[in-house]
Image: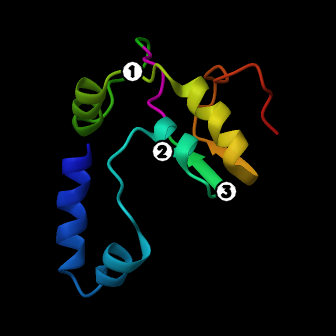
Amino acid sequence: MYSLLLDGFERAAQSPFTEEIASERIQLISENSIDYLKKCKSRYQCIYLDPMYPHNTQSALNKLSMRTIRAHVGDDQDSEQLLDISLQKAINRVVVKRPKFAPCISELKPS
């Protein structure tokens, strides 16, 4: 995933429309999110998590690009652990993107 994102950032840095965003306002880090947050001394106003959705065999297939990503990165096995460390590092909130009827990642109820 890092290689794909890096390629996109490098191309975005060459465009006058996205150069500032790609080169000055976004930092791309190649590290496990849990490890990064554990050693990071900073806290963040908001942390946004976008884990892989649980596999659903009763719906239409995802776009080919999303199926390809899932094939490379696999299912989200550590989403509960990532949520726990994110809640410790977030000052205001942690946003978790989930499908409408998917179960919660942990026993915490969303607000």
Q: Label 3: state its secondary structure.
A: loop
In which quadrant will I find the C terminus? top right
Crowding at dot 1, Cα within 10 Å, few <14 / some 14-19 / many 20+, comes out as: some
Q: Label 1: state its secondary structure.
A: loop
Q: In which quarter of the image is residue 104?
A: top right
Q: Which mark is residue 43?
A: 3
* Percent x, y of residue 53: 47, 27
Magenta span covers which residues?
A: 51-56
Q: Residue 97 carries which label?
A: none
Q: In which quarter of the image is residue 87?
A: top right
**Marks 2 and 1, Cα distance to the nearest angstrom?**
20 Å
Please count the marks in the image: 3
- Going 65% across and 58% down the picture, which residue do you hit? 44
Crowding at dot 3, Cα within 10 Å, few <14 / some 14-19 / many 20+, comes out as: some
Task: First in sequence, mark 3 or 1: give its number.
Answer: 3
Q: Compared to 108, does 49 lie above or below?
A: below
Question: The disc labelled 3 sits on which kind of residue?
Answer: Arg
**Marks 3 and 1, Cα distance to the nearest angstrom?**
27 Å
- Going 65% across and 19% down the picture, which residue do you hit? 103
Task: First in sequence, mark 2 or 1: give its number.
Answer: 2
For disc 2, the marked residue is 36
* Percent x, y of residue 17: 30, 84
> Left or right: where does residue 73 sit relative to residue 11?
right
Q: Label 2: state its secondary structure.
A: helix
Q: Is the magenta stretch mostly helix, strand or loop?
A: loop
- Going 54% across and 27% down the picture, which residue do you hit? 79
**Marks 2 and 3, Cα distance to the nearest angstrom?**
12 Å
Tell me the colour scheme of the image. Answer: rainbow
For disc 1, the marked residue is 75
Nearer the observer, disc 2 or disc 1?
2
Task: First in sequence, mark 2 or 3: give its number.
Answer: 2
